[in-house]
Amino acid sequence: MKNKTKAKKLIFGSIFICLVVLISISPVSAYTLNNLWWQYENAAFTTDSSVPSSWSYSITQSLSEWNDADSDFYFYQLGGQNNKFLYDSLGSTTTTLATTKKWKYTDTSYLSRCEITFNSDKSWSTTGESTKFDVQSAATHELGHCLSLGHSGVTDATMYDTMAKGETKKRTLHADDECGIIAIYGNA
Ligand SMILES: [Zn+2]
């Protein structure tokens, strides 16, 4: 998104195309946007040492899933960044599986930083075990928030707001999620 005029045109064009697709899937409510974005259409992420090392493949796959969505945006992995995956206690009685915190530059719509924290008080699996929550599904969902997507009303979308134990469908973006990222960052 290099300048405002281009951005507005891209957003209008993408929303129009997406509505045509969505009428046949869900006419009710689809992706939502927060009117914030990464100015240079990319973000480098670090996996903090608190995250179990056995999760690295799941995290890489979650980043790749958004990179494959045909938008202009690109995630990459690099050490020592402010954008991070973390693993920390968020409480065992809460329904919160993971949180995403975002920062933006003052007086702009540009995001400056994003942190995703997995709740270490929940049980996690990288293989879709039926009694645990899926790491890759949760990571893909939270990365959507880092891109500035809100929740979607489409139940099969990655950005739908709840996830059951053993559920792995959020690993794969739904057309609604792809329309959302393209609406923000344009079509590659
Ligand atoms: Zn969410």
Image (cartoon, grey):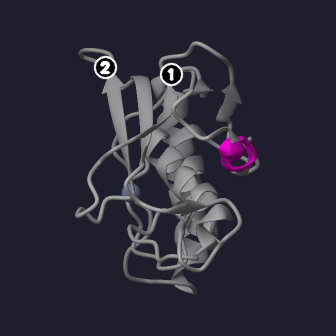
Question: Quadrant holding ligand 1?
Answer: bottom left
Q: Residues within 10 Å of mark 2 (few under 14, many from 20)?
A: few
Image quadrant in which the C terminus is located:
top right
The quadrant in which residue 158 appears is bottom right
Does the segment drawn in magenta span residue 33? no
- The secondary element bearing badge 1 is classed as loop
Measuring from the top left, give residue 30's x and y in whole percent.
43, 70
Which residue is the site of mark 1?
39
Is 59 magenta? The answer is yes
Residue placed under numbered mark 2 in the picture: 108
Q: Image quarter for residue 21?
A: bottom right
Q: Position of residue 132 (x, y in %)?
A: 53, 70
Mark positioned earlier in the residue sequence (1 or 2): 1
Out of 85 and 103, give the one closest to the viewer: 85
Task: Indicate which disc residue 9 carries.
Answer: none
Q: Is residue 112 above or below residue 165?
A: above
Q: Which portion, as a residue range, is magenta? A: 54-62
Q: Is residue 65 visible?
A: yes
- Residue 92 sits in which quadrant? bottom left
Label 1 to label 2: alpha-carbon separation: 10 Å
In the image: residue 12, left or right of residue 67: left
Q: How far across and how far down the image is residue 75, in percent?
A: 66, 32
Residue at the image point whose x is 58% and y is 12% from the top = 80
Q: Is residue 187 visible?
A: no
Q: Is residue 104 above or below residue 185?
A: above
